[in-house]
């Protein structure tokens, strides 16, 4: 039997361990979910909505324990207060739009026929959530899947081992049946076996490109629906008419918050050459003011990375870039221990020949390049295998829309970054994945259409 072990980035100690389900027990859990789903889907929609919102509220009551627990598991400073604000916002929005999003689509009725399309639940939905925002990423699918009438199995990353237990305890305490929402501990082989064995009707995975490919291979030939949010290398573009101070503050925060471990974090910045030097100067001043240290210290603004190997990948990208001619703008912080505690970095003199401008860094580093005009900026933004978000900075909304139309991305921001609006579809293109969560489209992806063509007896 496999043991999952969460190593705390604070000090390298073992924070939690859990035993994985055997393959037999895992298939039994999925079977229980399938059996329980029909009764769950038969409940009135409003009852499902109310129970999910009660479960969300119960998670909120745990926040005093959740915040330091997250700090221990993945290193986010306690000063930022956890994830409940976004967790609640996303679930509440999906609850608010559920009735309209799941309503029948009337096609037409006359004396002879009644025709309409229903949205019906997939059945059993499997959610594989990442460690970087373990509550918010999970709720994106858990809430609408349950509201739509599916049962849900939730698997969290080993780095945030206890999050699924917290969510399951909260949702069960609110009255959601235990077999309808299950937290499961699985190793990779069992996960693949479940998918290949048609245990699920839909799988939502947030993680690496390699992980997404593994999911696709496991699902090959099963016709199981997949929603995949994978890697990112999100750009920011500061145009010549931008509000410079706002651009610097937001883009650097977007690059460094959560130690750069954000799905839609800013990983590369292109600045009009007339503003470049000032932008870099202001950016450096912001980063030099960070306090790197224990996430349990309320004064800490930058905690350790979640795992030493993640920090080492960032160090390697930075070292390669410097060796190839890039300039490091930030000196090493005293608290940088060569392990999980990593100095933030701003690099200039970078190019797309460097991995730091191509590969996902997922850490507190950003490269900044000057550009002449929109055409050059668009070419550079599109020179990536990824496409999750792009952040455009200008006072001209028409210009932002025109540039955004040319950028290969899932979301276009103007004068903001690193935010997920639950009213919009959260989606990506290229190697960032496929599908879409939240919004009305999120409900469409978590249900299937079922058409009714009813001929009336007229004699």
Image: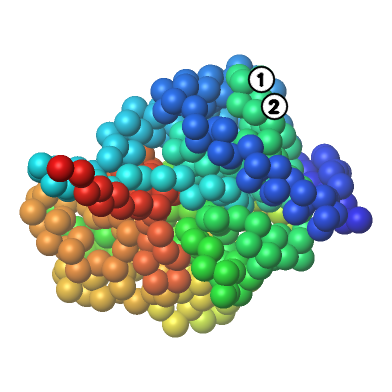
On the rendered structure, is 378 left or right of 314? left
Q: Which residue is mark 2?
A: 169
SS type, badge 2 = helix
| Quadrant where the image shows the C terminus | top left
| Quadrant where the image shows the N terminus | bottom right
On the rendered structure, is 123 left or right of 366? right
Number of other residues with Cα within 10 Å of mark 1, as a class: few under 14, some 14 to 19, many 20 or more: some
Q: Identify which residue is drawn at 40% across, 59% down.
A: 435
Of the pair 442 and 99, the residue shown nearer to us? 99
Q: Which residue is mark 1?
A: 173
Q: Identify which residue is drawn at 74% across, 50% down.
A: 158
Q: Between marks 1 and 2, how big is the CA–CA gap?
A: 6 Å
In the picture as drawn, the residue positioned furthest to the top comes out as 61
Q: Identify which residue is drawn at 31% across, 73% down.
A: 382
Q: Identify which residue is drawn at 11% across, 49% down.
A: 397
Instruction: Give percent across and percent down for residue 7.
Output: 80, 48
């Amino acid at each position: 039997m496999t043991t999952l072990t969460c190593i705390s980035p604070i000090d390298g100690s073992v924070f939690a361990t859990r035993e994985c389900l055997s393959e037999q027990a895992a298939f039994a859990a999925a079977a229980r979910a399938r059996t329980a789903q029909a009764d769950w889907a038969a409940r009135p929609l409003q009852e499902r909505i109310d129970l999910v919102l009660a479960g969300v509220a119960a998670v909120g009551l745990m926040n005093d324990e959740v915040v330091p627990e997250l700090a221990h598991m993945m290193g986010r400073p306690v000063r930022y207060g956890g994830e409940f604000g976004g967790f609640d916002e996303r679930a509440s929005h999906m609850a608010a739009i559920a009735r309209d999003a799941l309503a029948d689509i009337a096609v037409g009725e006359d004396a002879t026929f009644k025709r309409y399309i229903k949205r019906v639940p997939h059945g059993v939905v499997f959610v594989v959530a990442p460690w970087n925002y373990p509550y918010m990423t999970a709720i994106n699918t858990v809430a609408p899947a349950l509201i739509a009438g599916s049962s849900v199995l939730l698997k969290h990353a080993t780095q945030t081992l206890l999050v699924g237990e917290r969510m399951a305890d909260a949702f069960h305490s609110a009255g959601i049946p235990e077999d309808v929402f299950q937290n499961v501990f699985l190793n990779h082989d069992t996960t693949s076996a479940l998918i290949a064995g048609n245990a699920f009707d839909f799988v939502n995975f947030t993680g690496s490109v390699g992980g997404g490919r593994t999911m696709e291979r496991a699902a090959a030939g099963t016709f199981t629906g997949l929603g995949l949010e994978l890697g990112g290398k999100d750009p920011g573009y500061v145009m010549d008419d931008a509000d410079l101070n706002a651009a610097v503050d937001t883009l650097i925060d977007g690059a460094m918050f959560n130690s750069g471990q954000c799905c839609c974090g800013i990983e590369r910045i292109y600045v009009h050459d007339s503003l470049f030097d000032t932008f870099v100067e202001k950016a450096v001043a912001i980063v030099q003011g960070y306090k790197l240290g224990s996430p349990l210290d309320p004064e800490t603004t930058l905690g350790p990375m979640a795992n030493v190997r993640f920090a080492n990948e960032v160090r390697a990208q930075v070292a390669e870039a410097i060796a190839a001619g890039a300039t490091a703008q930030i000196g090493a912080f005293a608290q940088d221990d060569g392990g999980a505690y990593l100095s933030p970095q701003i690099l200039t003199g970078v190019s797309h020949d460097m991995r730091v401008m191509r590969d996902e860094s997922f850490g507190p580093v950003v490269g900044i390049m000057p550009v002449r005009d929109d055409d050059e900026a668009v070419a550079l933004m599109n020179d990536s295998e990824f496409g999750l978000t792009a952040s455009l900075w200008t006072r001209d909304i028409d210009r932002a829309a025109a540039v955004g139309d040319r950028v290969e991305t899932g979301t276009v921001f103007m004068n903001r970054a690193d935010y997920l609006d639950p009213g919009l579809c959260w989606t990506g293109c290229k190697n960032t994945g496929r599908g879409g969560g939240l919004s009305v489209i999120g409900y469409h992806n978590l249900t299937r259409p079922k058409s009714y063509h009813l001929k009336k007896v007229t004699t």
